[in-house]
Amino acid sequence: MPLDDCRLLQLPKVEDRRGNLTFIEGNRHVPFAIERVYYLYDVPGGAERGGHAHKNLHQFLVAMSGSFDVKLDDGHRKATFHLNRSYSGLYLSPMIWREIDNFSSASVCMVLASARYAEDEYVREYDEFLRLTR
Ligand code: T46
């Protein structure tokens, strides 16, 4: 089931008295080649992001600062992940409906994606998403 493909992945953490360092290499620490990076920040309290699925896109979400909840739905089952570490992240396979909320103050959500931005790659209507997954 697609939801079983979505999972928390631990990242390398190089500890140092000068501070910690984490790195991410495509097709090694995440299961796809990284083509795009974007991030959500200055998110006001109570705001929700997402509310869509992607037909073919693979993504990896990291809470670079603060925390937030990621609610996933594959059309059959649902799961919620709380992200609050910069040395782990959540892999999302294609055709997963996601909603992101409960952002803490000053939180930053960094997203690594397998392809450049393409609006026609989104499924933004939940009814259409259910039709495509059933
Ligand atoms: C996702 C969650 C976590 C671009 O022009 N380029 C981009 O790379 C992205 C991601 C967005 N945009 C434009 C498209 C919209 O006009 O930025 C605007 C806001 O995008 P959207 O409403 O899709 O933002 P979110 O936060 O609801 O969703 C985004 C990603 O789109 C989505 O893939 O999984 O973050």
Image (cartoon, rainbow, N blue to C red):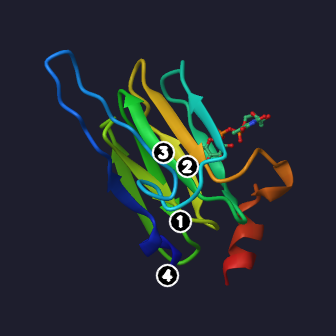
Which quadrant of the frame does ligand 1 lie within?
A: top right
Q: Position of residue 46 (x, y in %)?
A: 50, 29
**Label 2 vs label 4, nearer the camera:** 4
Q: Amino acid at mark 2?
A: Glu
- Give the alpha-carbon distance from disc 3 to disc 2, as whole Å: 12 Å
Which of the two labelled residues, at mark 2 and mark 4, occupies the earlier sequence position? Answer: 4
The numbered disc on residue 34 is none
Q: Residue furthest left?
A: 17
- Give the alpha-carbon distance from disc 2 to disc 1, as whole Å: 9 Å
**Which residue matches tag 3?**
61
Q: What residue is at 34 percent from the left and 46 percent from the top? A: 82
The answer to whether mark 3 is within 8 Å of ligand 1 is yes
Q: What residue is at 17 percent from the left and 24 percent from the top? A: 16
The numbered disc on residue 1 is 4
Tell me if label 4 and label 3 are in contact, CB under 8 Å: no
Image quadrant holding the C terminus, namely bottom right
**Which residue matches tag 1?**
73
**Which residue matches tag 2?**
99
Which of the two labelled residues, at mark 4 and mark 3, occupies the earlier sequence position? Answer: 4
Q: Would you say 89 lies left or right of 32 here?
A: left
Q: Secondary structure at mark 2?
A: strand
Q: Quadrant of residue 79?
A: bottom left
Q: Would you say 50 lies left or right of 68 here?
A: right
Q: Secondary structure at mark 1?
A: strand
Q: What residue is at 31 percent from the left and 37 percent from the top? A: 84
Q: Secondary structure at mark 3?
A: strand
